Image: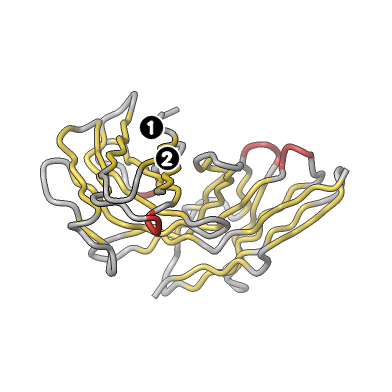
């Protein structure tokens, strides 16, 4: 089956620093990737839709200058948390859709645990 | 508008007994519905999906779900729980519009008693 990886799996950083999280589709090309955020014991919240070669579409209430998304190739999307603060600590999960498949074929990465001290 | 409601935040069953995780949806037309499982600090794994084919959907690890339009339900069941089934389960609906998106339920934590 299709595999999506994320790197790093966990990261600890100091307040005020920026952190980059990578999401890769390993065995397929993905024109569309999604970024989710999950707080402890809560559901996933869609943050943004990442489209290869164009600007990301952010959900209401998500600061696009805070969470920078770049989808420079068909197999890689990155999420950069800029000037991270403790309230940004969370579990970030990406997903990817193969080719021109619809949302029925969404594959999820294993997630990245971000802890901001 | 489409949404999904998971009626139980926590379900606890004994090993070897049946599992029932409830999910209701609201949709103006035939939805696509999914169940995902998430083990601690792990990503999401697709258990099964309904996309307007057979109403009884069989998934992995012995799970199945039945789409009941009259009840707007998509409950997840398993005849006999195993310790390894302990995890968080999410019912998910796809919202189709000019900007289609996936909507997650609030999740149900399944605990298995020895």
- Disc marking residue B5: none
Residue at numbered disc 2: A112
Using a 10 Å C-alpha cutoff, classify the residue at mark 1 as few (fewer than 14 neighbours), some (14 to 19) or many (20 or more). some
Disc 1 on helix, strand or loop? loop
Left or right: A49, with A11 as reference point: left
- Where residue A98 appears, x then y in whole percent? 31, 36
Q: Residue shown at 40%/37% (left/top)?
A: A11
- Where residue A99 appears, x then y in whole percent? 26, 36
Quadrant hosting residue B60: top right
Residue at numbered disc 1: A8
Left or right: B24, with B113 as reference point: left
> On what subunit does the disc labeled 1 rest?
A
Asked if marks 1 and 2 touch (Cβ < 8 Å), the reply is: yes
- Report the quarter where the N terminus of chain A lies: top left
Q: Nearer the viewer, residue B33 or A83?
A: A83
> On what subunit does the disc labeled 2 rest?
A
Q: Residue shown at 45%/42% (left/top)?
A: A113
Q: Nearer the viewer, residue A3 or B1?
A: A3
Left or right: B15, with B107 as reference point: right
Q: Residue shown at 11%/41% (left/top)?
A: A53
């Amino acid at each position: 089956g299709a595999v999506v990886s994320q790197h790093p799996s966990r990261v600890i950083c100091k307040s005020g620093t920026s952190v980059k999280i990578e999401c890769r589709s390993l065995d397929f090309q993905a024109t569309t990737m999604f970024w989710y955020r999950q707080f402890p014991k809560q559901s996933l919240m869609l943050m943004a839709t990442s489209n290869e070669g164009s600007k990301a579409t952010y959900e209401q209430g998500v600061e696009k200058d805070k969470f920078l998304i770049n989808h420079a190739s068909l197999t890689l999307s990155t999420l950069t948390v800029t000037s991270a603060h403790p309230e940004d600590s969370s579990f970030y999960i990406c997903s990817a859709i193969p080719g021109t498949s619809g949302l029925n074929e969404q594959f999820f990465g294993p997630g990245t645990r971000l802890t901001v001290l | 508008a489409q949404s999904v409601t998971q009626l139980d935040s926590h379900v606890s069953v004994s090993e070897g007994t049946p599992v029932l995780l409830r999910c209701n949806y609201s949709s103006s037309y035939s939805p696509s519905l999914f169940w995902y499982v998430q083990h601690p600090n792990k990503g999401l794994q697709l258990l099964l999906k309904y996309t307007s084919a057979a109403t009884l959907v069989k998934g992995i690890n012995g799970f199945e779900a039945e789409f009941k339009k009259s009840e707007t339900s998509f409950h997840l069941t398993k005849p006999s729980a195993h310790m390894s089934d302990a995890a968080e389960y999410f019912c998910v609906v796809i919202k189709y519009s000019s900007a289609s998106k996936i909507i997650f339920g609030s999740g149900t934590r399944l605990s298995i008693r020895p």
